[in-house]
Structures are given as structure tokens and as C-alpha cells.
Image (cartoon, rainbow, N blue to C red):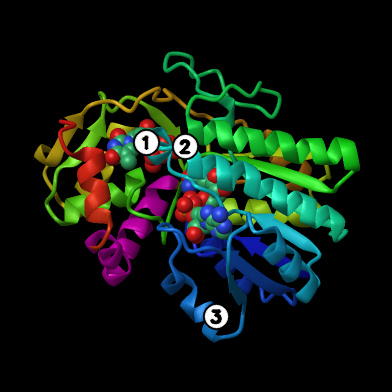
Amino acid sequence: MNQLITGGAGFIGANYLYYLAEQNTKDKIVCLDSLTYAGNLHTIDSLIKEDKITFVKGDITDRALVDKVLTEHQIDVIVHFAAESHVDRSIEDASAFLNTNILGTHVLLEAGRQHGISRFHQVSTDEVYGDLPLDRPDLLFTEETPIHTSSPYSASKASADLLVLAYFRTFRFPVTISRCSNNYGPYQFPEKLIPLMIANALADKKLPVYGKGENVRDWLHVRDHCRAIAMIVNDGKVGEVYNIGGHNERSNIQIVQTILQSLGKDESLIEYVTDRKGHDLRYAIDASKIGKELGWKPEIYFDEGIVSTIKWYLDNKPWWEEIVSGEYQAYYAKMYGGRS
Ligand code: NAD
Ligand code: TYD
């Protein structure tokens, strides 16, 4: 089988490429990534050098290029990670989100359909379900929870999901969708909560917590997510949506305190800043369907996963220090300046 992985130079896509390489897959793996600010070729350097993957730099909205890649590499399966993925950026300017997340997904669907590929997997998010109240721990997102988006990011992902399902219903195009909760682990860009807090704490910079830090996320180690995606690609039923989550709900302030404690830093570094607009209160996933149908369950406990993740950021300073030294400075000043 020949697989096209989009967005493989980003956080989860790169972890997926490493996961496939570790499985000693006989499949030919091609990665298509346009290397936006979030894509980093250094992340997958070793896979390229060892010929474990073929890398193509390009945009998923470029139909001619996508056609060329599908033909040249005789692609059978597309696993689609590429996206604009940061909620805060989507609040600043949604245009890239609509372009990549909706139009880009459409290009891949249409090209994949015309090339007769055997599986298209859409990597989606629990954020398409909107949010849950903080005072109803009994409520969880199931695959039947209505789509009810809050941010331009989640609206763009939900639009893409609806297109994917339309291609199944209309054309019988063989799709699957996974909707996962918040991921953490190696190679996450330090604009997201966990790597940002680790990087700031190590530099003795303030840790900007939105609002009161009460918002809850359901954290899952990226490796567990990758394992789930591989199971769905191999054995999932076409036309189906699978939720993925860790049953590991933590408030943001709990996460930040855990990081500070692990690094031996003082809580005086915490700074409560103006809340995110439209900030979703709580995400929590019911992952029983993938458990029952495919036998998946999370394997990495958060208390261990967060320690190994912090260690990874300590051991791989050059990887993220390069990121936080460049354009990131301007991003940081724009997003956080004057917010406290
Ligand atoms: P990321 O922002 O770290 O990486 C995105 C990658 O896509 C980058 O390498 C970027 O260069 C590439 N890309 C962006 N636009 C492109 C385009 N037009 N053409 C080609 N490549 C392009 O994102 P991530 O956190 O790895 O998320 C991957 C996927 O998983 C996304 O679809 C996201 O919606 C979904 N997801 C993420 C999380 C999470 O916690 N991070 C949780 C659930 C689902
Ligand atoms: P984030 O990592 O952006 O993921 P998402 O918005 O997709 O859940 O944020 C996780 C939570 O952390 C979210 O409730 C917003 C909050 N947050 C902060 O409090 N401070 C920050 O600097 C960032 C980036 C996020």
C-alpha cells in the first residue's frame, strides 16, 4: 500500500510518521507539507535521510500538485493531518483556516475520488462538538453529539468533516473520520498550552493563563492518538466517525501547576491574562466506540506522559529554541502584549 500523509512536518503528523516507521511498515510513505510556520523539516530529517519517507513540499490546495503526487506515487490511502490548527490565530484571522482546512480538504477529496483511492482518513477534533458545562462531569461528547462550533478553527474543521461525510454519502468514497481531544507530547509547536508553558517556565518568563484557568481539556498523549488513527485506517468501518480521548480531564491551571512543580519553578510565574474570546469551557470524550469496535484504549497515563514530555523538551532544546527565537517573538508580542 502507498500512503500519502498530509501535514507530516507538524506535531501530530510527524509523530504519526515516526509511529509508522517504528512499525516497520512495508508501505511506501509520502509526506506532503507546505511548511507553514507550524511545519518543521528538522522534525522529520532523520526519516527523510534514512529513506523511510519521501517528502514533497507543497500545498494541499494545489490541485495540479496533488494530482501529480497521487499519480507518481500510486497512492492508495490518504491520511489527512494538514491544517491550520491554533484557535487563537483563527480568532486573529480566519482566512488561512478556511483555505487550508475546508478548500484544501476538498481538493484532497476530489483528487482522491478521481484517482480511485481505497481510503481517505480525516484527522479531526473534538472541538467540532463545541463545549460542555464545567458543572456537569456526567456529560461527554459521543459521535452523535451535534456539531456546534465556537471558534473559526473549529468551524473550519467541522465544515471539512461535513464535506468528508458528503463524499461518502454521495459518491460512496471510502472515508473515515477521527475526532480527538487535546494532544501533548514531543514536537508540539510552543504556541499551544503545554509546550508554551514549559518553554516559558524554563526561561523564567510569565506563564499566561487565560481567564481563571478553570477551562478543562481532556489530554491524550500523541502516541496514543497515532495508534488509534492507524487502527482506524486499517480496520475502521467506512463512513464512520470515531472519537478518541484519554478520560483525562484537567483544568488549565492544574496543567500549569504540574509543569511548574516538575521543573521546580515557583507559582509566582503564573499570570492570569484576558480570556480568549468565545473560550470553550470543557471538552470530554466518550471513546467507547473505538474501544468496542477496534479494541483501542489509551496506554500512556498522563502523570507519566507529562514527565516524559517535559524531559523531551529539556533534552531537545535546540528544536524549540530555534522556533522561539525567530518570527515567534513578533507573534508572542502581538498575542500576549497588553493582555495582563
Ligand atoms: P500543526 O499545526 O502542528 O501542524 C500542521 C501541519 O500542516 C504543519 O506541518 C503545516 O506546515 C501543515 N500545513 C498547514 N497548511 C498546509 C497546507 N495548506 N498544505 C500543506 N500542508 C499544510 O497541527 P497538529 O497539532 O499536528 O494537528 C494535526 C491535525 O490534527 C489537524 O488537522 C488538527 O485539526 C488535528 N487535531 C489536533 C489536535 C491537537 O491537540 N493538536 C487535537 C485533535 C485534532
Ligand atoms: P490550546 O493548547 O491552544 O488548545 P485548544 O484551544 O485547542 O484547547 O489551549 C489549551 C487551553 O489552554 C485552552 O483552554 C486555552 C488555554 N491557554 C492558556 O490559558 N494560555 C495560553 O497561553 C494558551 C496558548 C492556552
Residue drawn 28% across and 28% down?
Answer: 213
Q: Classify 10 Å Cα crowding around label 1: few (below 14), some (14-19), many (20 and above).
A: few
- Whole-percent x, y for residue 6 in the image: 62, 60
Residue 92 circle label: 1
192 on left or right of 76 = left
Q: Residue furthest bottom?
A: 50
- Asked if residue 260 is positioned above or below residue 156 in the image, the reply reads below
215 or 106: nearer the viewer: 106
Q: Classify 10 Å Cα crowding around label 3: few (below 14), some (14-19), many (20 and above).
A: some
- Whole-percent x, y for residue 201 in the image: 18, 51
Q: Quadrant of residue 155?
A: top right
16 or 40: nearer the viewer: 40
Residue drawn 28% across and 25% down?
Answer: 275
Quarter of the rendering occupied by the N terminus: bottom right
For label 2, the SS is loop
Residue, disc 3 = 48
Quarter of the rendering occupied by the C terminus: top left
- Whole-percent x, y for residue 157 in the image: 59, 38
Q: Amino acid at mark 1?
A: Glu
Residue range corresponding to the magenta coloring: 302-325
For label 3, the SS is helix
Q: Amino acid at mark 3?
A: Ile
Q: How far is disc 1 from disc 2 in space, using C-alphas?
A: 7 Å
Residue, disc 2 = 94
Q: How far is disc 1 from disc 3 in space, using C-alphas?
A: 34 Å
Which label sits in the foreground, 1 or 3?
1
Q: Is mark 3 within 8 Å of ligand 1?
A: no
Q: Is any part of residue 223 visible from this angle?
A: no
- Asked if residue 102 is positioned above or below residue 66 in the image, the reply reads above
Q: Amino acid at mark 2?
A: Ala
